[in-house]
């Protein structure tokens, strides 16, 4: 059983910074691609940033230059550093990971979500 637990959300101010963390625990052999997604009220869940096991990253245009995704493979933890926050960044943020739990078992896992609210 694998669990992803996010932390670090909360209230931020426009122009400020927040850092999200996502810790994976359980029967983990290795973690492939990981990412952060967000869902604002009444909208679909969208990709914010992804990072693969080799460290290659991909960002949504709306966050390029402001957000940085990273991961610590030794700790099975990923991070999202959010700088220059904007009110439109307000959403529930979810971490996602593709995880090998054995040499043949692979699954896609989601965290429970953490609220980020940016005031103007």
Image: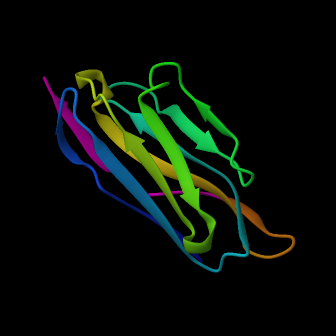
User: Looking at the image, which residue sits at the far bottom?
Assistant: 27
Q: Does 114 lie within the magenta span?
A: yes
56 left or right of 26 in image: right
Find residue 120 and report its horizontal and vertical position in percent: 13, 22
Residue in the image at 30% along x and 28% along y: 84
Q: Position of residue 78 (x, y in %)?
A: 51, 57
The image quarter in which residue 16 lies: top left
Question: x%, y% of residue 42?
Answer: 33, 25
The residue most toward the right is 104
Number of marks present in the image shown: 0
Q: Is residue 92 magenta?
A: no
User: Range of the magenta residues?
Assistant: 108-120
Residue 71 visible to the viewer: yes
Residue 18, located in which quarter of the rendered image?
Answer: top left
Outermost residue, top side? 61
Query: Is residue 65 shown above or below 93?
Result: above
Q: Residue at x 46, y 53 (%)?
A: 79
Is residue 116 or residue 54 the one in the foreground?
54
Residue 113 visible at all: no
Prevailing secondary structure of the magenta residues: strand
- Residue 17 in the image: x percent, y percent? 27, 39
Where 68 sits versus 76, above or below?
above
Please say if 10 is above or below 49.
below
Instruction: Indicate left or right for 52 with 42 as reference.
Output: right
The residue sitting at 31% across, 35% down in the picture is: 91
Q: How is the image coloured?
A: rainbow
Q: Quadrant of the N terminus?
A: bottom right
Farthest residue toward the left?
A: 120
């Amino acid at each position: 059983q694998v669990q992803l637990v996010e932390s670090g959300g909360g209230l931020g101010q426009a122009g400020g910074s927040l850092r999200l963390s996502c810790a994976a625990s359980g029967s983990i052999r290795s973690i492939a691609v990981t990412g952060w997604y967000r869902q604002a009220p009444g909208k679909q869940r969208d990709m914010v940033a992804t990072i693969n096991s080799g460290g290659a990253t991909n960002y949504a245009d709306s966050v390029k230059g402001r957000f940085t995704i990273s991961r610590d493979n030794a700790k099975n933890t990923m991070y999202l550093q959010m700088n220059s926050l904007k009110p439109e960044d307000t959403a529930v943020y979810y971490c996602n990971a593709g995880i090998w739990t054995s040499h043949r078992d692979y699954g896609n896992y989601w965290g429970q979500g953490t609220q980020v609210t940016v005031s103007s």
